[in-house]
Image (tube, grey):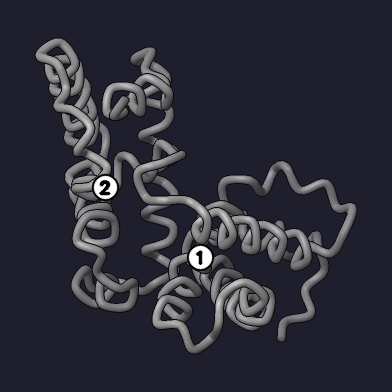
Amino acid sequence: MTTRTNETWLSDLRGNGATREAALTDLREVVEHGLPYALSRWLSPNDPLFAPLIEEVTQETLLRVLDQLDTFEGRSMFTTWVHKIAVRIALTELRRKRWQDSSLDEMLDNEETPAPAGLMADRSPTPEESAVRADMLERVRRILNEELTPKQREALVLLGIQDVPLEEAAKRMKTNRNALYKLLHDARLRLKRRLLNEGISAQEVLAAFEQK
């Protein structure tokens, strides 16, 4: 395991090139080492969902940490802070259904993924609701096409819509996992800034697709 100080972690993760990639690789090992033990209190390691969940949460944790580096106050070890983030993400994934309490990123990543049939059975949307949803989806798709690079869109499709494993996605895109993390991180920031500039909130996107 790495012996970086808090300051070194922050500096390396904010850096570029080989330094940043090495820090991401080491941080991934930290999460993958500690998360299974913590998660085993709520989900058996023998459960078929266990290994995929570890992979998914690890990926999301690294992205979340990159997003929130400026919020780390140094009151604990950096790796302890990261571990707490990973556990929160894991527990959230365990207790919520995909269509509920979605983040903006998940809504964008899974825009074409249908909700379970049983959850759609109450009633069909009204014509007005259908029009609102169609308009919102069109606006989001336009933003995706205009704001993201082809590589960023490809990464979102592979990982978010087609659910391709991270290693396979990196192989198809002829890159490595750390570069792919950065690609997704940058894509999320660009999407959030663009939505904000257009006056679209996460709540508006979610409300347009909500089944009442």
Which quadrant of the figure contains the N terminus?
bottom right
The residue at which mark 2 appears reads as 110
Residue type at mark 1 is: Val
The residue sitting at the front extreme is: 122
Say whether residue 196 is left or right of residue 161: right
**Residue at disc 2, secondary structure:** loop
Task: Name the residue at 43% across, 61% down.
Answer: 181
The quarter holding residue 77 reads bottom right
Viewer-closest of 130 and 185: 130
The quarter holding residue 80 reads bottom right
Say whether residue 25 is left or right of residue 136: right
Task: Name the residue at 75% across, 59% down.
Answer: 81
Task: Name the residue at 52% across, 70% down.
Answer: 21
The residue at which mark 1 appears reads as 57
Q: Earlier in the sequence, mark 2 or mark 1?
A: 1
Residue type at mark 2 is: Asn
Q: Position of residue 188 (x, y in %)?
A: 40, 42
Between marks 2 and 1, how big is the CA–CA gap?
A: 17 Å
Q: Position of residue 89 (x, y in %)?
A: 57, 57
**Residue at disc 1, secondary structure:** helix
Q: Is residue 79 above or below residue 115?
A: below
Say whether residue 78 is left or right of residue 29: right
Q: Position of residue 86 (x, y in %)?
A: 62, 62
Say whether residue 68 is left or right of residue 51: right
Find out whether the residues at labels 2 and 1 contact each other: C-beta distance under 8 Å.
no
Q: Is residue 41 above or below residue 10?
A: below
Task: Name the residue at 28% across, 22% down.
Answer: 208
Viewer-closest of 193 and 21: 193
Which quadrant of the figure contains the C terminus?
top left
Q: Is residue 146 above or below residue 87?
A: above
Which circle marks residue 86 in the picture?
Answer: none
Q: Residues within 10 Å of mark 1 (few under 14, many from 20)?
A: many
